[in-house]
Amino acid sequence: MSFALQPARAAGATQPVTQAESRMRVDLAAAYRLCARQGWDDLIYTHISAAVPDEPDHFLINPFGFAFDEIRASDLVKINGRGEVVGDSTHAVNVTGFALHGAVHAARPDAVCVMHLHNSAGVSVSAQACGLLALSQHALRFYGRLAYHDYEGLAFTPAEGARLTASLGQHPAMLLRNHGTLTVGRTVAEAYVLMATLIKACEIQLGAQAGGQVVQPPHALAQRASEQLDDGGAVEGELEWPSLLRKLDRIDVSYRD
């Protein structure tokens, strides 16, 4: 959470929206709606950002003050890496909120989509000294592939951005201690599916711990399962995403507007 700030506007004429950007806008708006339906939103806070195709250093992000369940493709604000609005959007954005995302986008060229949430299960596990345990197949997806970053307070500085991205390294996901979850994806679909898997793993862990003594598979088996679930680095979400969009279309197609 941080304060709403209206950024400066980048110089230059407004460019027409390309088909590639339109598709990215629809996917990103869908991710916001899906997160809301899962109860992963936190009032108007947290963000999902996506790089604009073929426009280096340009990103799409939610307008600050909008709930996840009301965001439409046309509502998303285009900004540059400095948090300046690009184009003629009248919506405000949370510049300090984008700072975390901007740092990850800059450090990870493969991070087309960066998703950061304050889901209760994810925050709970992030606060456990043990972190995410190998208690489920969902958790094994991240065995040896999950980063951690210690809590540093609300004010996000360039120095923390450097420390956070160093903590993230090349991992696909991170637990921000006492704060929340973060996933990166080569597509919006991949970031969403990774987040769904991570949150499910956290929910299973909390449930298992509440039930008593837990059992974990041996290291060698957990490592082999993680490699199988990684599937050679295949882009996740390609099969799941069309079905998720169809689900949204049956409920409310306004996210596409």
Image (cartoon, helix red, strand yellow):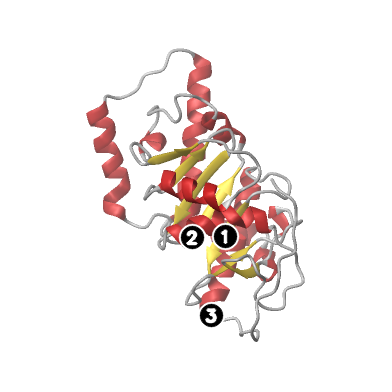
Name the residue that disc number 3 marks. 19
| Image quadrant occupied by the C terminus | bottom right
Q: Which amino acid, mark 1?
A: Ser
Q: Amino acid at mark 2?
A: His
Q: Quadrant of residue 80?
A: bottom right
How many marks are shown on the rendered structure?
3
* Residue at screen point 61% across, 85% down: 16
Horizontal and vertical percent position of residue 230: 31, 47
Q: Are marks 1 and 2 in contact (CB under 8 Å)?
A: yes
Q: Front-most of 73 and 241?
A: 73
Residue 232 location, x and y as percent?
A: 26, 52
Check disc 2 and report the residue beneath it: 105
- Residue drawn at the location 54% of the way across and 63% of the way down: 50
Residue occupying the point 55% across, 53% down: 158
For marks 1 and 3, give the CA distance.
18 Å
Rendered image: mark on residue 49: 1
Report the Cα–Cα distance between label 2 and label 3: 22 Å
Q: Is residue 51 visible to us here?
A: yes
Q: Earlier in the sequence, mark 1 or mark 3?
A: 3
